[in-house]
């Protein structure tokens, strides 16, 4: 997640054992095990704590063509256990423009897997690929439709 091709950039990788934060130097890199994440994962783009919603104005213009393309950062917000602390996992903005519906789908994926205590599924490449394909194929555009698709995905994961 993020721009993995930017030299010296920050980006995140969902692995079977947790979220790996790639950074400018190896000493800044970090693996956060899924078991430490307590209350799910929040998401913001363009600012650590946007005033409204999860995407700030910088997050919106960072995807537009021109000099602002790829500018800014995104953040995953987590509360960790043992020891208890808040963690912001930052990543550099990818230059691709993401429609608001895709950002809402991504946020729903994080929220619903966290609420179901299934965050480790994000580290399963097969499950995540299936989930993203399902979200893309169904094009859920309302909260109700997103909730339905996510509950179906998580029910299938249990079997």
Image (cartoon, grey):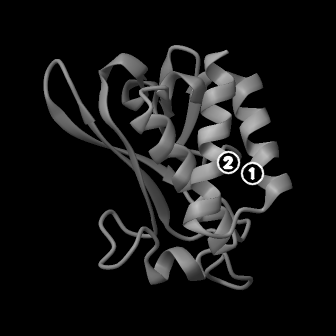
Query: Relative to 51, is 157 above or below?
Result: above
Graded by Cα atoms within 10 Å as few (under 14), some (14 to 19) or many (20 or more), the crowding at tag 2 reads: some
Quadrant the N terminus occupies: top right
Disc 1 secondary structure class: helix
Q: Locate residue 136 relative to residue 61 in the image: left or right.
A: right
Quadrant, the C terminus: top right
Q: Label 1 belongs to which residue?
A: 135
Q: Residue at point 63% right, 68% down?
A: 70
Identify the residue at horizontal 56%, vertical 71% (top origin): 71
| In this picture, residue 110 sits left or right of residue 126 | left
Q: Can the viewer see residue 3 in this picture? A: no
Q: Position of residue 153 (x, y in %)?
A: 67, 35
Element marked by disc 2? helix
- In the image, residue 150 sits, relative to residue 136, either above or below, namely above
Residue 86 is at least partly visible in this image = yes
Write down the residue under mark 2.
149
Comparing labels 2 and 1, the label whose residue is closer to the camera: 2
Above or below for 92 versus 16: below
Please state the horizontal and vertical placement of residue 12, each as a whole percent of the image.
54, 38
Q: Position of residue 150 (x, y in %)?
A: 61, 44
Lateral position of residue 112 relative to residue 30, left or right: right
Decide: few, some or many residues near mark 1? Use Cα within 10 Å; few <14, some 14-19, many ≥20.
Answer: many
Query: Residue 2 vs residue 98: left or right?
Result: left
Q: Vertically, is 135 above or below 15?
A: below
In the rendering, at what x and y percent does residue 82 appear? 17, 18
Cα gap from disc 2 to disc 1, whole angstroms:
7 Å
Give whichever of discs 2 and 1 has the lower sequence position. 1
For the residues bearing labels 2 and 1, Cβ distance under 8 angstroms: yes
């Amino acid at each position: 997640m993020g721009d993995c091709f930017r030299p010296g950039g920050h980006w995140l990788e969902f692995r079977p054992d947790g979220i790996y934060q790639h950074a400018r130097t190896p000493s800044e890199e970090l693996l956060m095990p899924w078991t430490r994440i307590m209350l799910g994962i929040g998401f913001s783009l363009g600012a650590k704590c946007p005033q409204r919603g999860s995407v700030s104005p910088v997050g919106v213009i960072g995807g537009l063509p021109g000099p602002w393309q790829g500018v800014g950062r995104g953040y995953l917000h987590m509360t960790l256990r043992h020891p208890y602390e808040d963690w912001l996992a930052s990543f550099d903005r990818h230059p691709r423009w993401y429609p608001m519906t895709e950002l809402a789908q991504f946020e729903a994926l994080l929220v619903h897997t966290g609420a179901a205590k299934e965050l480790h599924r994000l580290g399963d490449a097969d499950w995540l690929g299936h989930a993203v394909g399902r979200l893309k194929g169904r094009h859920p555009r309302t909260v109700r439709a997103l909730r339905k698709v996510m509950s179906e995905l998580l029910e299938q994961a249990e079997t």
